[in-house]
Amino acid sequence: MKNMSIILGFLAGVGLPIQTSVNTRLRKKVGSPYNASLVSFVVALLFLSALLLITGQGLHIPLAQLLNEPAWIWIGGICGLVFLTGNILLFSKLGGVQTVVLPVLGQILMGLIIDNFGLFYSQKTPLSVFRIAGAVMVILGVVLVSMAKENKTASEKLQKSESTTLWIWRAFGIFAGMLSATQIAVNGYLGKVVGSPIKASAISFTVGIIFLAIICIVLHFKNGKSESFKNESAKNPWWMWIGGILGGLYILANVYLSRIVGTGMTVIILLIGSTTGGILVDHFGMFESPKKPINAQKILGVLIMILGAAAIKLL
């Protein structure tokens, strides 16, 4: 049971950068990253609702009980929509590997803060020399991956202004990762309150859908057809609709796996899976993404990052 859960967690991690790639393609059809995120969230909610019915848990949500909990119990969905939409934007700017590793850095840093202060009713784990050293290793790994040259031609064409813009996007990637860590902590507690990781995930996506719908409606009236679905004649691949399922599985894995192997091992398993997925997407140009072959510096950076995460979570 434990080994199977670890394998499923790894596969859920692999699915994260694939989801980003798929949603990037979906964006071409629906006109904006916000529309793409909304479609992805709706698909995820339908998928999770089907799981609730199949497992006999039903669709009932203990709303009265939730209203007695802290207000922050609802913010998981908001953090998730920023993370998902941000990934769609980052993917086209930075590629699959950086879209994975930069949020990981933010996740690690925010995880240290949450653990040190016991935020969101999480178990308090004070900072130690090993955890600080691990954070430094993660930062070093991220820097190595971020500064690795894709190819000489591309790097020679990069102007200073473009370089500055890229670092702004990288900073946003770290911020998105911090929100992802917040979502994991919030949804972890939410899962305990409702007694079901599937229901906790469904609630998170429902909140995200509400806010995304508001954003899409506002943008529709502000920008008109430019933010609406596009009636393009090009054939749309069937796989561009599966991003929501992959996202639902990833969030569900966060809530479920932590109960079996603990939060620390959950982060490590998903980290290894997501970095592996990012490398595959970049190297092979999967799902219509641009090919960005892996080099030794990127591999070294990813390995250092994983070792740093392990030091933080296991020592």
Image (cartoon, rainbow, N blue to C red):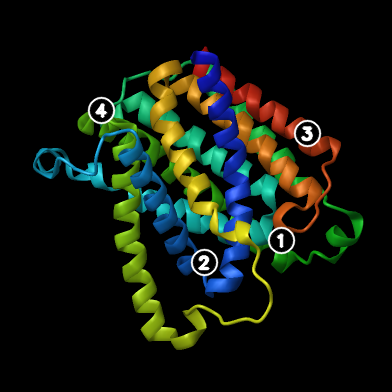
Mark 4 belongs to which amino acid? Lys
What is the spatial separation of the Cα atoms under label 2 and label 1, in whole angstroms? 23 Å
Residue at the spot x=40%, y=81% of the render? 220
Mark 2 belongs to which amino acid? Pro
Q: Say few, some or many: other residues with alpha carbon within 10 Å of mark 1 (under 14 / 14 to 19 / 20 or more).
A: few
Q: Is mark 4 on a helix, strand or loop?
A: helix
Q: Say few, some or many: other residues with alpha carbon within 10 Å of mark 3 (under 14 / 14 to 19 / 20 or more).
A: some
Is 56 on the left-hand or right-hand side of 114? left
**In this rendering, the label closer to the viewer, 2 or 1:** 2
Q: Which mark is drawn over residue 33?
A: 2
Residue at the spot x=57%, y=82% of the render? 231
Q: What element carries label 1?
A: helix
What is the spatial separation of the Cα atoms under label 4 and label 3, in whole angstroms? 38 Å
Mark 1 belongs to which amino acid? Ser
**Residue annotated with mark 4:** 192
Residue at the spot x=63%, y=29% of the render? 272
Q: Say few, some or many: other residues with alpha carbon within 10 Å of mark 2 (under 14 / 14 to 19 / 20 or more).
A: many
What is the spatial separation of the Cα atoms under label 3 and label 1, in whole angstroms? 22 Å
- Sequence-first tag of 3 and 2: 2
